[in-house]
Amino acid sequence: MTDNPNVETKVLEDQPHLKVEEAKSSLPAQVLENCLPAVETQEQIDARIKREVEAKQLAEYRAKVQAVVDQVQVLTMPVVYVGAALAAAFVVFVMLGLYMEDPEVKLHTQQTIIQTHIGNLDHLMGMAQLQHFLPLILVLSVLTTVVCYFLFAKSRPREIDWSDSHLFLEYSGPLSYAIKWAAVESVVQTRRWDLFNGKQPNFIVKTKEGDSFTLKLTDIAQKHDVRSFFTLIKTNAPSAQITVDSEFASDNSYTELWLRYFSSPAARAKTGQLEKGARLVSGLYEIDHVIGGGGQGTTYLSKINPALIGRKKTSQEEHIFERIVTPSMEKLASVQQVVLKEYVLPVHRGQLTAQKTAEKLKAEAEILMRLDHPRIVKLMDAFIEDYRGYLVLDYIPGENLKEMTERLGCLPEKLVIDCAIQTCEILEYLHGLVPPVVHRDIAPDNLMLHEDGSIRIVDFNVAHQVDSSATATVVGKHAYIAAEQFRGKPTPQSDIYSLGGTINYLLTGQEPEPITRSHPRMLNAKVSEKLDEIVANCTYQKAEDRYKNASELLKALRAI
């Protein structure tokens, strides 16, 4: 079966209306049944949508019922606490009173006290009068209960969420407020003690209608970036007075730069792909030609104007472009050409969509800035201009292994082994970082063969740091994705599976069967048994059956 490696797995997830014939021609039944959503007919799609709508309505109804229950619990909690305190105090009072009134107990107590404390009549009288303090103990118990409930209620987390136009605050149980960002008049920072978090920043938000709300930092940061909160206020209520620490409302945060650029749905100066000769960053970069393109944007080869390297931005250029990272002037000065990787965001989709795209670009930039390996593409600069974001990467002269195989057919085994060893050395470096970096898209078109014969890994768009507790998005070319990666749980061994599929492609010129153990010798009799076995061991469906790490695979490759 042949695959189209340019079709990512998410196509099936995002487009349930994909034709059945097209889906069946690109994926085996095993993948359709076990790893990907089943391909459906129109009737099945309609039935599924109906079930989803009904399930959503039921979930909303249950949420409302639960909210009412929570409200009842909130209202009855003080009564329960006070009632419990009164009952406990009453029981203590009755039991102690009965005990002290018992004639035998009273006589025994008096004899014991007299024998132990002869002449200490004051102590005896104090014991006898103990019961007179029981009402005071009862009152103190009630007051302590009330104070504890008050502190608990004040420290209880508040649900905070927002959209591009409104801020949503949970007030009490099912009650909530929706505040327009444009209605915010001022935000003042204070510090208050919290029962669960200690002393932490609080923000007093006042509206033009006179309402006032106190929001805790922990509640704001529970779902969103705190800086985005203040960016939305600045964008929609520019006259609002914001008196907070710069770390919360800085104008230089990575995400905020994007939100500022995409906050208003203005038209782009340029539409579509940039033409040859187009200039960016006030002429520092000049587009030479298009290298490739995709759904996110286009990749360009660009020339550098050495006279403009290091030049500071003028006041007239303040709103033309914005840098995201500090450029590496030394690297820029050492090259004549760079690759511009473009991220395009539709300007009418809202700020939250912009933020997600900004975070995606930020993640790739942060990973590339962490990496220091001679065979990994280097990041030199990153900026936004004309509602697009750009990563400036070093240019690698040569061709990728996908293009080479299409041009030459099956590659010689010796060359394939050399490419596999070099790739494995890079994976050994990536997986050895703390936390490990999983590339998640090792494939022939992401491995460049440099003119000097070295392999370079490019495109860290979908790379994943393993320390993340969240389930990763299913990305990558489905012919090269391991089963656990389909489930959103990539590991370093997922890259080993992808490398095995890549070796299979280079030896056969055919895409490997998804989620299938590959044997290139079945398609190319010239492949040695040892290399065929290595590929098969890389592509086991279960991760524990594959090579444990890149070092183990590297040892096997060098032993051929």
Image (cartoon, rainbow, N blue to C red):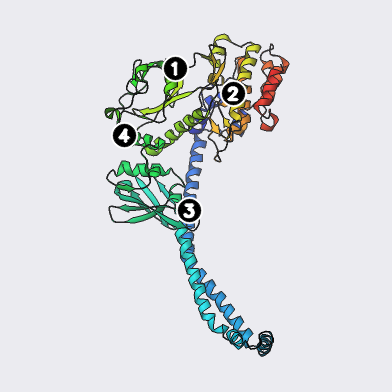
| Mark number displayed over residue 426 | 2
Q: Nearer the viewer, residue 55 or 172?
A: 172
Q: Secondary structure at mark 2?
A: helix
- Tell me the mark number nearer the camera, choosing from 1 and 4: 1
x then y, percent, for residue 351: 37, 38
Q: Name the N-terminal-most of marks 3 and 4.
A: 3
Q: Nearer the viewer, mark 3 or mark 1?
A: 1
Of tags 3 and 4, the one toward the viewer is 4
Chain-order first, disc 3 or disc 1? 3
* Disc 4 residue type (three-letter): Pro
Camera-side mark, 2 or 3: 2
Q: Residues within 10 Å of mark 2 (few under 14, many from 20)?
A: many
Real-space Cα separation, disc 3 to disc 1, in angstroms: 60 Å
- Callout 2 touching callout 3 (CB < 8 Å): no
CB within 8 Å, label 4 to label 2 = no
Q: Position of residue 447 (x, y in %)?
A: 55, 19
Q: Which residue is mark 4?
A: 265
1 or 4: tag closer to the N-terminus: 4
Splitting the image into 4 quarters, where does residue 549 fall?
top right
Question: Mark 1 highlights which residue?
Answer: 334
> Tag 3, which secondary structure?
helix
Can see residue 145?
yes
